[in-house]
Image (cartoon, coloured by chain):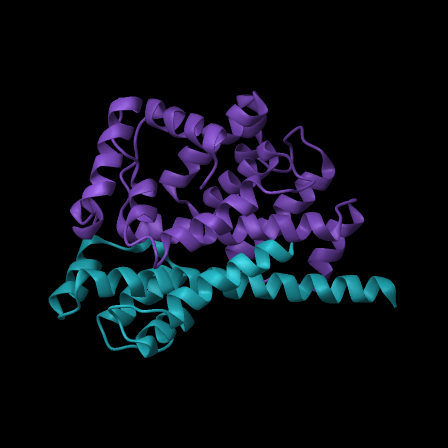
Amino acid sequence: MRLEILNSGYTFGTKVLFAFIQLASRRPVPDAAKLVFYRTDFYGEPMKLFTHEAMRGPSAWSVGDRELMAAFVSKTNMCEFCIGAHTATAAGAYHDQARVAAVLSNLETAPIEEPLRATLRMLQKLTREHTVEAADMRRVLDSGVSRAQIEDALAVCFAFNTTNRLADAFGFFVPGPKGFESGAKYLLSRGYK
Amino acid sequence: MEEKRTAHQVLVTRVLEGDGRASRAERHDAFDNATLIEPLHGLISKVAKHPTLITDDDVAAVKASGLSEDQIFELVVCAAVGQATRQYQNAVAALTVAISDEGS
């Protein structure tokens, strides 16, 4: 990563944890994990709490839907690391790689439910243009999405509009498919805590 | 939803108001994508609006200007959280208007 402190500036306890993770997964510790383990009190702990609540907390959206939103926001931001990580996690959550690939390829023709499509459309506009209007929200509500579901989707969007920026700014290493699959298994079993 | 809003506020308050290596004023400026001295302003502005365009040279230039890596870490985090927060708050406000219009 572009800051040396994010490569090697960890406490002894964290270095031991990283060694254990590396041994258990037989893969290098992903840079996303390194980021949240650096000076955890400043960013890692509060961000992990928010992200876990958004991605695994109570919601009418399934885990697969929320991981798909994460992948879709990351695709809109063209964040290579997060596209790979959350495409693999969404595919694992749904047990359906084709569904995720179809949405990322063309939202308008993908075989998904209309409420999810309307929500993703709104998240795309918010991510791309940084702003949405009441009319955009009315279209999502009219598709059958509840206010609580929109609020939940906006929380996912916040988490990944933050993380995408940090991945690009700090220069996260982009692993291959096996690295992403390993990360997806971890996120599906442990979440973001 | 209350849990998410609370967790978001905790994050924002921590990065802006808690202890840090960069001053609180600098963290607020990075969060707001306000005018900062160059080359820091160029980096912060890219974090907010064009993160895929950030290069090794952008970060190296800020380091060469005298900021420590910990200061850069904090200011980049503030810039990312700040831009995502503006989007989040804009969308929540739009949703509130849409719901209120439905009820009227």
Measuring from the top left, give residue A135's x and y in whole percent. 73, 60
Measuring from the top left, give residue A121's x and y in whole percent. 63, 47
The residue sitting at 37% across, 40% down in the picture is A80
- The quadrant of the image that shows the C terminus of chain A is top left
From the rendered image, report the letter of the chain displayed in cyan: B
Q: Count numbered badges in the picture.
A: 0
Work out whether A13 lies above or below B21.
Answer: above
The residue sitting at 44% across, 65% down in the picture is B82
> Does the rendering let one see residue A101?
no
From the rendered image, report the letter of the chain displayed in purple: A
Work out whether A38 lies above or below A85.
Answer: below
Identify which residue, B86 or A124, lies in the foreground.
B86
Work out whether B24 lies above or below B12.
Answer: below
Q: Quadrant of residue A176?
A: top left
The residue sitting at 38% across, 76% down in the picture is B34
In the visual, does A74 lie left or right of A140? left
Work out whether A18 lies above or below A141.
Answer: above
Measuring from the top left, give residue A89's x and y in whole percent. 48, 30
Measuring from the top left, give residue A74's x and y in whole percent. 46, 44
